[in-house]
Image: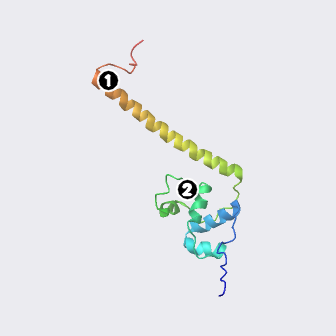
C-alpha cells in the first residue's frame, strides 16, 4: 500500500508593522473598496477574517465599547482625504491614554448620579436633611 503524506496546511506567519496597519486602515476608511478587496490588495489572500477591525482596535481607531455600532457611523465622520502617517508609539500611547481617561470620566459621572439618587432616596424615606444647605453659616 502506498503511504499517504499530508502536507501541512499551516500558513507562514504574517507580521504587519504599525505603518502597514495604518495604510490598510486608511484604505478601508476611504470607503472606495470593501474590506475583502483591500485585504486582497495588501496580502493576496481572499479572506480577511476580521483582521482590519482588529488592527483598528489595536491602533485606537475603535473603542471596544463602541464596536457594536456599524462602521458606516465612523466612516461618515471621516474625510476622504488621505492623511500622512506620522503616528509613532508615543502617539498611540497618548490615544490609548485619552480613551482610558474618557472611560474613567464616564464611570465617575455614573457614580455621581448613583450617589445623588441614593441621597435623595434617603432624604425622602428617613426625612432627614443630608445635604448641607448653602444659607447656613
Category of crowding for the residue at label 1, using alpha-carbon neighbours closer than 10 angstroms: few (below 14), some (14–19), many (at least 20): some
| Colouring rule applied to residues | rainbow
Examine the rendered structure and indicate whether residue 132 appears above or below residue 39.
Answer: above
Q: Residue at x 48, y 64 (%)?
A: 72
Task: Kindly give the residue lying farthest to the bottom in the view shown.
Answer: 1
Q: Residue at x 59, y 59 (%)?
A: 56
Q: Residue at x 66, y 48 (%)?
A: 93
* Residue 120 visible in the current orientation: yes
Task: Kindly give the residue lying farthest to the front in the view shown.
Answer: 1
Task: Kindly give the residue lying farthest to the top in the view shown.
Answer: 137
Compared across the picture, whether 133 is left or right of 103 comes to: left
Q: Which residue is mark 2?
A: 62
Label 2 element class: loop
Judging depth in this view, the residue of 117 and 6 nearest the camera is: 6
- Which of the marked residues, 1 or 2, is nearer the chain's N terminus? 2
- Tell me residue 43's x, y (percent): 66, 73
Disc number at residue 84?
none
- Quarter assignment of residue 123: top left
Task: Give how far apart the Cα atoms at labels 1 and 2 are.
Answer: 42 Å
- Tell me residue 70's x, y (percent): 46, 62
- Quarter assignment of residue 113: top left
Compared across the picture, whether 15 is left or right of 126 comes to: right
Q: Quadrant of the C terminus?
A: top left
Disc number at residue 123?
1
Q: Quadrant of the N terminus?
A: bottom right
Circles 1, 2 touching at the beta carbon (< 8 Å): no
- Tell me residue 25's x, y (percent): 61, 64
Judging depth in this view, the residue of 126 and 95 nearest the camera is: 126
Amino acid at each position: 500500500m502506498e503511504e499517504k503524506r499530508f502536507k501541512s496546511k499551516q500558513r507562514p506567519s504574517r507580521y504587519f508593522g504599525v505603518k502597514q496597519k495604518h495604510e490598510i486602515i486608511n484604505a478601508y476608511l476611504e470607503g472606495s473598496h470593501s474590506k475583502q478587496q483591500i485585504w486582497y490588495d495588501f496580502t493576496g489572500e481572499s479572506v480577511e477574517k476580521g483582521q482590519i477591525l482588529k488592527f483598528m482596535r489595536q491602533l485606537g481607531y475603535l473603542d471596544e465599547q463602541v464596536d457594536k455600532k456599524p462602521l458606516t457611523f465612523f466612516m461618515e465622520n471621516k474625510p476622504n482625504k488621505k492623511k500622512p502617517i506620522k503616528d509613532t508609539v508615543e502617539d498611540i500611547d497618548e490615544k490609548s491614554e485619552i480613551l482610558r481617561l474618557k472611560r474613567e470620566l464616564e464611570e465617575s459621572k455614573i457614580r455621581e448620579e448613583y450617589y445623588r439618587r441614593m441621597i435623595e432616596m434617603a432624604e425622602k424615606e428617613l426625612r432627614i436633611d443630608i445635604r448641607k444647605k448653602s444659607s447656613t453659616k
